[in-house]
Amino acid sequence: MSVNLLDFDLEGLTAFCEGLGEKRFRATQLFRWIHQKGASDFSQMTDLAKSLREKLPSSACIQGPNVVSRQNSADGTIKWLFEVGAGNVIETVFIPESDRGTLCISSQAGCAVGCRFCSTGHQGFSRNLTTAEILAQLWFAEHTLRKELKISERVISNVVMMGMGEPLQNYSQLLPALRVMLDDHAYGLSRRRVTVSTSGVVPMMDRLARDCAVALAVSLHAPNDALRSDLVPLNKKYPIDELLQACVRYQAAAPRDFITFEYCMLEGVNDQPENARQLVALMQKYAAAGLSSKFNLIPFNPFPASGLKCSKPPVVMAFSKILLDAGIVTTVRKTRGDDIDAACGQLAGDVQDRTGAKQRLASQRQGMLGGIKVVVTERLSA
């Protein structure tokens, strides 16, 4: 069976090439062809030895994703739907802005965390994506856009692991993918421009800090354990104090001088002034321990099974003012891509869930930064 070379970081590809009797520099050449040039045909790789070009097709392939659909928004947002087998689909979204191009990538088909406000959690968990399936989203989008724009320079400057799934529950496949994103022989992205979002898998946060400390976004959504456990069941295993202690540890290794916190605004649930004041007290406690924070307040996109509603704009503004007055950097998210259902929690299409029942599946964990909720940031004045 052919090995998909998108499954390998440079170290893995080197081991593969050495297994074929090739020297290390051949792996670097091959790596550049795959990721910098987007090649999938070994015969095109003209600086590889002819013997290697002839040898590779029998043992390896470069297999991109199976595209189910593509939608283009009036605002420039692009949403791809990729099929990953057994009726499962994932979404990848490109968000163009004047100073950057951001790609939101999925890490799982479905999600096991089961947050109340997340449509993806309601469909259940199917499986982890492979490293190749994670990286193929970037590989495909980058080189597809280059061809369409007729340019050779990089199109995607930022990657956010904020699509379907909890990235840190697929750590073994995520880590090599992150290393490829950062590798100068591949995409050469800055650690500041690659963000992993998590609902709070504390042990894996510590591992990520040691192994590949990229930017971190934490889905908080509540200022106390009782409320957060109701909204984010993972909180029962890793309560807020453990989570924020992990954030303090992570910040010591992080490429940015702050941790981003996501807060999904839910009417009458977590959006009251008292909730904001509790949040201020919580963050002030951990600021004393060295934690610097930035908050993104995210309007909820309702779906029937949740029984939840989005907070009214004046309530969101009042909530944000309490945080800002306390000196906490706070932004409110504005959606983009609504005309192609690319906003957070919107529906991806008719696909099969893991039980075989056909239903409309949402493709985004509600409340993630950037991601399938295609957004721009507006800084609020105090």
Image: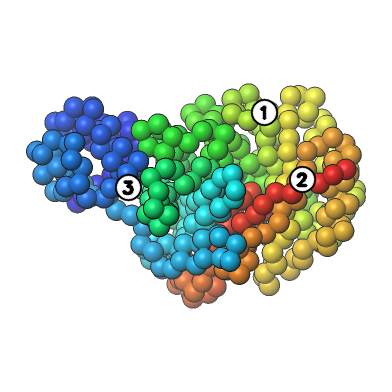
- Mark 3: few/some/many CA within 10 Å (<14, 14-19, 20+): some
The number of numbered badges drawn on the structure is 3
Front-most of residues 52 and 88:
52
Q: Which residue position is annotated with label 2?
A: 379
Give SS at disc 2: strand
What whole-number distance in Å separates the C-alpha atoms at marks 3 and 1? 34 Å
Q: Amino acid at mark 3?
A: Gly
Give SS at disc 1: loop
Instruction: State the image coordinates of residue 359 (x, y, percent, origin top left).
Output: 53, 74
Regarding residue 31, the answer to whether it shows in the image is: yes
Pick the quarter of the image with the C terminus. Answer: top right
**In this view, the mark in front (3 or 1):** 3
Instruction: State the image coordinates of residue 292 (x, y, percent, origin top left).
Output: 73, 30
226 displayed left or right of 92: right
What whole-number distance in Å separates the C-alpha atoms at marks 2 and 1? 18 Å
Tell me if residue 138 comes above or below residue 185 in the rendering.
Answer: below
Regarding residue 110, the answer to whether it shows in the image is: no
Of the image marks 2 and 1, the number of the one nearer the N terminus = 1
Marks 1 and 3: in contact by CB < 8 Å? no
Tell me if residue 213 comes above or below residue 148 in the rendering.
Answer: above
Which label is found at residue 208? none
Instruction: State the image coordinates of residue 13 (x, y, percent, origin top left).
Output: 28, 35
Give SS at disc 3: loop
Front-most of residues 34 and 111:
34
Residue 245 sits in quarter: top right
What whole-number distance in Å separates the C-alpha atoms at marks 3 and 2? 37 Å
Q: Amino acid at mark 1?
A: Asp
Q: Which residue position is annotated with label 3?
A: 38
Q: Amino acid at mark 2?
A: Arg
Which residue corresponds to the image point at 30% horizontal and 37% vertical from the top-left?
31
Q: Which residue position is annotated with label 1?
A: 257
Residue 147 sits in quarter: bottom left
